[in-house]
Image (cartoon, grey):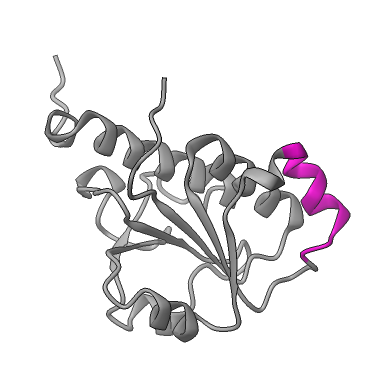
Amino acid sequence: MLEPLARPLHLVLVSPQIPPNTGNVARLCAVTGSRLILVEPLGFSIADRELKRAGLDYWDKVFLKLYPTYAAYQEDFPDARRWLFSARASTSLYAARFEPGDHLIFGSEVAGLPPEVMGGGSGQPVTIPMLEDRRSLNLSTTVGIATYEALRQVQLGEAARQPLSAS
């Protein structure tokens, strides 16, 4: 059973474009106790039917905050530990050492995180390993993988942060 965190993870979507992906992430937030942060511009309206449908009846259990810009989001969380997810980062998600309250940052389905976010020193770039010559994973799949790895580490403590060994 998953235990609620005193300092929950924050899942930050920067300029998401596809309503069902964001709805799926909202549902993930509801079942994990993570906080959802959306950074504009969005490719849809918050009232979008597909967004609401993908989130099912969990919307009342989702902490949602909307920011007009990435800079505005940073101003509200100046000391946050940020992990910047990109298919082009060189550090694996499994090398990251997540802590309670961390912010996991994801870019749009079309363009990923903007260069000013990736190169602006606002966080540590990480990637989810994939086979060569593959462009990327689906946004909501990526967020799910990253969230559960972070929760695994945080819930299990130091033992989960040790490198896995092949037997």
- Nearer-the-camera pick, 124 or 128: 124
- Judge left or right: residue 122 versus residue 116: left
Query: Is residue 121 visible in the rendered structure shown here?
Result: yes
**Residue at 18 percent of width and 34 percent of height:** 157
Q: Does residue 112 appear left or right of residue 148 in this picture?
A: right
Can residue 135 be seen here? The reply is no
Please give the name of the residue rendered at 76% of the width and 38% of the height, measured from the top-left corner: 57
Question: For the C terminus, which image quadrant?
Answer: top left
* Horizontal side of residue 74 vs 64, given as left or right: left
Quadrant location of the N terminus in the rendered image: top left
Q: Is residue 30 above or below residue 76?
A: above
Front one among 144 and 77 = 77
119 sits left or right of 116 in the view:
left
Total marks shown come to 0
Image spot of residue 117 (x, y percent): 41, 79
Q: Residue furthest right?
A: 49
Image point 52% across, 66% down: which residue?
A: 107
Q: Against 89, is 69 above or below?
A: below
Q: Is residue 47 magenta?
A: yes
- Magenta part of the chain: 46-57
Q: Position of residue 77 (x, y in %)?
A: 37, 74
Q: Where is residue 37 shown, x and y percent of the image?
A: 54, 63
Relative vertical location of residue 53 with respect to residue 123 in this rendering, above or below: above
